[in-house]
Amino acid sequence: MKGDYVTDIVKKTAEKLNCRYLENASMRDFTSFKTGGNADIIVFPDSIASLTAILKSCRENEIKTYIIGNGSNILVSDNGLFGAVIKIGSDFSNIEIADENTIVCESGISMAKLCSFALENSLSGLEFAFGIPGTAGGAAFMNAGAYGGEMKDVLIECTHIDTDLNVGKLTGDELGLSYRKSAYSDNGDIITSLKLRLEKSDKESIKAKMYENLGKRKDKQPLEFPSAGSTFKRPEGYFSGELIEECALKGYSIGGAQVSEKHAGFVINKGNATSTDIASLIDFIRKTVYENKGVMLEPEVRFLGEF
């Protein structure tokens, strides 16, 4: 289903629920790559009830849905997205202390706000995540990690809406957390909230570690350009950036997309890239590294739409 039909159905549902929405919205404004065509409609649910109702309406009317957070790990087709984009973001970002060392938050809260909340409450364990640009739900979905830490270290429970539109939860080992992967990577369920177990610590030492990690990001990563962070997962026994650099691809460009000259593990938008440029460069890197090193790199980036 495309176009006016999709917009009309989803718009009416959103209005009944008092949810914000945008029609014919440019995905450039909702992805960290700053590329991509327009979506028929983007809806911003503000509760589990509204999220479930939107999903139910789309399913009943055979409307394709795309679930996004901050858009920091996706590449959207230049042709746009035909269907409804459901953005779980700042409208879906309540957070609270559950007990002395446990935080419960909705999945749309940014990692920056989650880390700052932990700091305010003298809770340690999320220092590694300060500077990760996505949402808490996105971080749980992919078991995000950096600087010796990962969500696996602190995440103890997620609630979700399953593929039958029922509310459920996974705890402990059920979360299936491994390198850049969780049970949610494959099961199609939508994370709605997280429970994190942290440790009481000195506020100044937490803050110092957070900003030490942020400084490392600024020194080593091309944060001044649009990107999706690390473009590839780390292959076992290797580092993707090193493999790419050893293949003399640092600085290599296709259109407006470039292998960062600062860190070869990042594909960046130099300012005028299309999603096709970025996808072509990712494909070229993978083929070149495989031909020269015998390692097939796996993208961390998710591709949405037609490529």
Image (cartoon, rainbow, N blue to C red):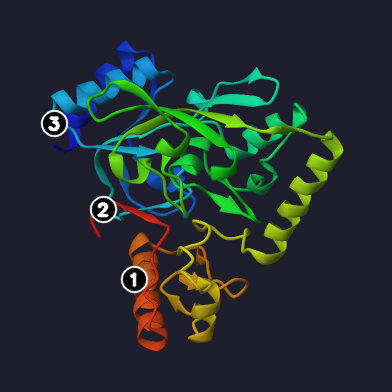
Comparing 164 with 198, the one in front is: 198
Going from N to C along the chain, the mark reached first, 3 or 1, is 3
Q: Tag 3: Cα neighbours inside 10 Å, few (<14), some, or many (≥20)?
A: few
Q: Tag 1: Cα neighbours inside 10 Å, few (<14), some, or many (≥20)?
A: some
The N terminus lies in quadrant: top left
Asked if 75 appears above or below 163 in the picture, the reply is below
The C terminus lies in quadrant: bottom left
In percent of the image, x 76 and y 28: which residue is there? Answer: 120
Residue 266 location (% of width, % of height): 52, 66
Residue carrying label 3: 62
| Mark-to-mark CA distance, 2 and 3 | 20 Å
Comparing 256 with 157, the one in front is: 157
Q: Given the current orientation, which residue lies at the most extreme front position? A: 173
Residue carrying label 1: 280
Which residue type carries mark 2? Answer: Asn
Residue carrying label 2: 79
Q: Quadrant of residue 255?
A: bottom left
Under tag 2, what secondary structure? loop
Left or right side of 173 for 197: right
Which residue type carries mark 3? Answer: Glu
Of labels 2 and 1, the one closer to you: 1
Going from N to C along the chain, the mark reached first, 2 or 1, is 2
| Mark-to-mark CA distance, 2 and 1 | 15 Å
Which residue type carries mark 1? Answer: Ser
Q: Tag 2: Cα neighbours inside 10 Å, few (<14), some, or many (≥20)?
A: some
Residue 72 location (% of width, % of height): 48, 48
